[in-house]
């Protein structure tokens, strides 16, 4: 593996771990030339899945590109690397199960937003701002208001008339 710091190919593996889902191997490496430590991931890339971009270009599906976009949306949020890897693995699995070998980038973007919304609303809005090309603060405000409205609609309505009566106690702990 080529060292990202000095560009040499001599390294040794310090640690190897398999992801919880069993679909990736994480390796910590040490460059024997400059002693720089770096991490690599080994995953199975679904065969022949191509992404059709908005402008009509076609390119091979790259899970690392997807991971980088999600990582940027989650920057400085309390979302660990394992959660990001899980999202990427979930999307990769869904794409590999599709009957066609081409998928539109919009489909992938919508999947990412759906999963990010469940994990972290700030990361969701960040990703949506890039994906949907927000042009100004009003676009952010609209997205947040839409999300709040969806959250409110999903909350069960509380019926105060069915609540049990509350006993009022005095300082001695006895019911008044």
Image (cartoon, grey):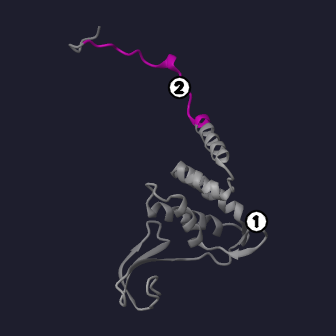
User: Residue 161, image x and y in percent?
Assistant: 51, 16
Q: Could you say whether the residue bearing mark 1 is in a helix, strand or loop?
A: loop
Furthest residue toward left: 172
User: Residue 99, image x and y in percent?
Assistant: 72, 68
**Residue 95 found in image quarter:** bottom right
Q: Residue at x 55, y 77 (%)?
A: 44
Q: Residue at x 78, y 68 (%)?
A: 55
Q: Which residue is mark 2?
A: 158
- Between circles 1 and 2, the one closer to the viewer is 1
**Residue 174 found in image quarter:** top left
- Which residues lie in the magenta part? 152-170
Q: CA distance from mark 1 to mark 2?
A: 44 Å
| Residue 163 included in the magenta stretch of the image | yes
Vertical side of 69 occupied by 17: above or below: below
User: Residue 26, image x and y in percent?
Assistant: 43, 75
**Residue 141 found in image quarter:** top right
Relative placement, left or right, of 142 versus 90 is right
Q: Residue at x 44, y 85 (%)?
A: 3
Classify the position of the C terminus by image quarter. Answer: top left
Give residue 26's mark. Answer: none
User: Residue 120, image x and y in percent?
Assistant: 51, 50
Q: Residue at x 66, y 43 (%)?
A: 142
Furthest residue toward right: 56
Q: Nearer the viewer, residue 1 or 24?
A: 1
Q: Which residue is mark 1?
A: 54
């Amino acid at each position: 593996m080529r060292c990202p710091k000095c560009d040499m190919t001599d390294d040794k593996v310090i640690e190897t771990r398999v992801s919880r889902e069993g679909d990736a191997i994480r390796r910590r490496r040490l460059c024997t030339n400059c002693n720089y430590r770096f991490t690599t991931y080994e995953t199975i890339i679904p065969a022949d899945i191509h992404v059709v971009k908005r402008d009509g270009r076609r390119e091979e599906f790259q899970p690392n590109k997807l991971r980088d976009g999600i990582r940027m949306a989650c920057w400085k949020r309390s979302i660990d690397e394992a959660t990001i890897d899980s999202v990427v693995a979930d999307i990769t699995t869904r794409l590999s199960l599709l009957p066609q070998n081409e998928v539109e980038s919009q489909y992938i973007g919508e999947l990412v937003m759906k999963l990010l919304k469940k994990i972290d609303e700030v990361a969701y809005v960040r990703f949506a701002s890039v994906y949907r090309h927000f042009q100004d603060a009003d676009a952010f405000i609209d997205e947040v208001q839409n999300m709040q409205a969806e959250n409110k609609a999903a909350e069960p309505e509380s019926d105060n008339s069915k609540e049990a009566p509350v006993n009022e106690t005095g300082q001695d702990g006895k019911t008044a």
